[in-house]
Amino acid sequence: MDSILFLPEPAPQIPLFSPEPNQIYLTSYSGSRNLPFLRLTQRFLQDGSIKKTRVVRNSHQSAGFIDSKTGISDVPLLTGLEVFEKLKAYRGKIKGKQQFLAMYSSIFGGITTDAAAMVIPMDDHMVHRGHGVFDTAAIMDGYLYELDQHLDRFLRSAIRSKINPPFDRESIRRILIQTVSASKCRNGSLRYWLSSGPGDFQLSSLGCHQSGLYAIVIQSQSPYSSTGVKVVTSSVPIKPPQFATTKSVNYLPNVLSKMEAEEDGAFAGIWLDDDGFVAEGPNMNVAFVNKEKELIMPHFDKILSGCTAKRVLTLAESLVKEGKIRGVRMKNVTVEEGKNADEMMLLGSGVLVCPVVQWDDQVIGDGKEGPIAQTLLNLVVEDMKSGPPTVRSPVPY
């Protein structure tokens, strides 16, 4: 592919990155501990008057004063080693449902299993301009589920975003698998990003030295749930098709839609397209079982083409053969048709198949988790555990 910059293939084994005291990648400052005081720029009030001249001290100098009016003490000037130590202490205080087991960075040129070192440069344009794409793959019993399907979408998103990967497809695939191997994680998820890379704080990526590839392995304690949820119609504007069909890191509309739903006591918001048809959720597709016992799903022309949703469409064909549903098709779905459906469900790698029992004030079906949603969830989980090689990639631990 002419639009991709091919670099030499990485070594067969990606090196584990272990931070050394004088090889820290966390800060551009690597000066001596004995630097003299650095004076902070004078602070100004909103009206422009000078409030106070402050002094920044090296962290090994005597403790500074605390301003009695602001309660803010002198800001310490840290060495790279001190930054890393503070990051480790900060990570040690965080108690979340997710554990970060391994990270690959093309900036490091290797893998680290130290969560404190799982960082990216501030001047990476993915950070301050949102110029990056990402994708994910579930890890089930030591296999990556639909890795190739997600990777293909990842590279399509990169092309649409004008980002040239630093490696060819097979090298990226090998790096992702080796990162999971280094993590020792057998059940969790792999998330990976491609950015336009670090370089400066300009708008254009012309000053970026090279694109950046990052990947992280996450072990989550949250199992997939078959409990029914409530959704609401989102008031946050949906992304235009050009951006909705690309899996980029520009997720502010998605975040706001999700938060709006949570504030209303719901699980997620449902977007409608410009014509008023059902579109998608903030990070999942939507499907219905209509009155004719068909499994229907909105077209992918204006929304993200979900890998899980596409797999569900394939797996659902077995339900047609068994007579549990009459057919499977994609179509424009009106809000009325959706709210009056026998079943409604959310589809995505994070939820797999999640039944919806209420949309706004409308109860879906009989208000209970539908049998088709439950059957499809079982089919996807079984596919993750024993599906064909086309959807299961083994990880050599």
Image: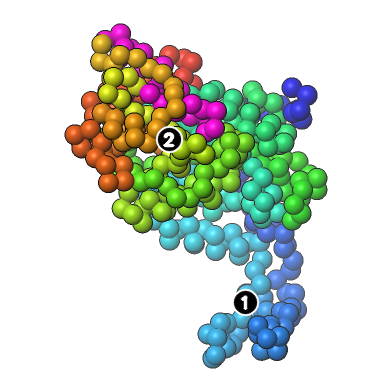
Q: Amino acid at mark 2?
A: Val
Label 2: few (<14), some (14–19) or many (≥20) C-alpha neighbours in 10 Å: many
Helix, strand or loop under label 1: loop
Looking at the rendering, in which quadrant would you find the N terminus? top right
User: Which residue lies under the disc numbered 2?
Assistant: 278
Label 1: few (<14), some (14–19) or many (≥20) C-alpha neighbours in 10 Å: some
Q: Which of 245/311 is in front?
A: 245
| Residue at (34, 44) in percent of width and height | 231
Q: Amino acid at mark 1?
A: Val
Mark 1 → mark 2, Cα distance in angstroms: 51 Å
Helix, strand or loop under label 2: loop
| Residue at (54, 91) in percent of width and height | 68
Q: Which of 9/267 is in front?
A: 267
Please tell me whether residue 303 belongs to the stretch shown in magenta: yes
Please tell me whether residue 208 belongs to the stretch shown in magenta: no
The numbered mark, 1 or 2, whose residue comes first in the sequence reads 1
Q: In the image, 109: left or right of 276?
A: right
- 127 above or below 280? below
The colour scheme used here is rainbow
User: Which residue lies under the disc numbered 1?
Assistant: 75
Residue 296 in view in this figure: yes
Magenta region, residue range: 296-322
Residue 382 in view in this figure: no
Q: In the image, residue 29 lies at what x, y percent?
A: 72, 63
| Residue at (68, 86) in percent of width and height | 47
Q: Which of 270/48 is in front?
A: 270
Q: In the image, residue 369 lies at what x, y percent?
A: 23, 33
